[in-house]
Amino acid sequence: MSQSPAKSGGKVRLLGLITIIIGAVMIVAGAVTWGAVSTKLAAENITVSADAPMFAGAKVTGPLEAFVQADVINGHALKATGGKTYAQLDKEDPLRATAMNGSFLRSSLFTSVIAFGVALFAIGVGALAIVIGYALRLVGAPRVAAVPVTAAE
C-alpha cells in the first residue's frame, strides 16, 4: 500500500530538516575543534625556526605553520645525527635521544595538522549536509496544482 504524496512529502521534508541540523552540528563541532587545537598550539609558544622556507618567526597556531615547523625539526634532527634516523642509530649512540626527541616533536605537530584536517573535513561535510537537507526540503514541499486558465467568452 503506497502513501499519499502529502505524507511522503512530509517525511522527506522532515529528513531534510534532520540533515540540516546534523550539518549545523558538524560545522559547529569542526569549528570548535579547529579553535581548540589552535588555542592549545598557541599556548605552547612554538615559533617557526628562522631557517624555515616560509613562516619564519611566526607563531605556530595553524596547520601550515605546524607542518613547516615539523619539517624543520626533521632537518635539524637529521643534521645533528649525521643524516641518520632514530632506527638507524646504534642503541648506545648518545645522538639517539636527539633523534627520538625530534621524532616525538614532529609527531606531536603532525597530530595537530591531522586534527586541523579532520576539523576542516567536518565543516565541509556539515556544509554539504545542509545543502542536501535544503534540497530534500524543496523536493518534499507540497505542490500547488495548476489551475487552467480559460479565455473569457
Image: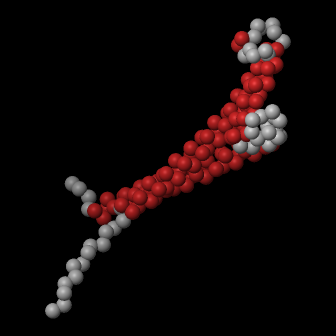
Q: Nearer the viewer, residue 102 or 3?
A: 102
Residue 62: name its quadrant: top right
Name, please, the residue furthest toward the bottom. 153
Residue drawn 75% across the image and 35% down it:
53
Assign the N terminus to one quadrant of the image.
bottom left
Assign the C terminus to one quadrant of the image.
bottom left
Q: Nearer the viewer, residue 31 or 90?
A: 90
Q: Left of 46 or right of it: where is 106? A: left
Residue drawn 66% across the image and 45% down it:
33
Residue 142 x, y percent position in the rendering: 33, 67
Q: How many numbered discs sit on the rendered protein?
A: 0
Residue 119 x, y percent position in the rendering: 61, 44
Residue 76 x, y percent position in the rendering: 79, 24
Tell me: residue 54, above or below residue 26. Answer: above
Q: Left of 71 or right of it: where is 121? A: left
Q: Nearer the viewer, residue 63 or 18?
A: 63
| Residue 140 appears in the picture as rendered | yes
Residue 98: name its quadrant: top right
| Residue 105 appears in the picture as rendered | no
Residue drawn 31% across the image and 62% down it:
7
Residue 137: name its quadrant: bottom left
Residue drawn 82% across the image and 14% down it:
95
Q: Left of 10 or right of it: where is 18? A: right
How was the colour assigned to the protein in this rendering?
secondary structure
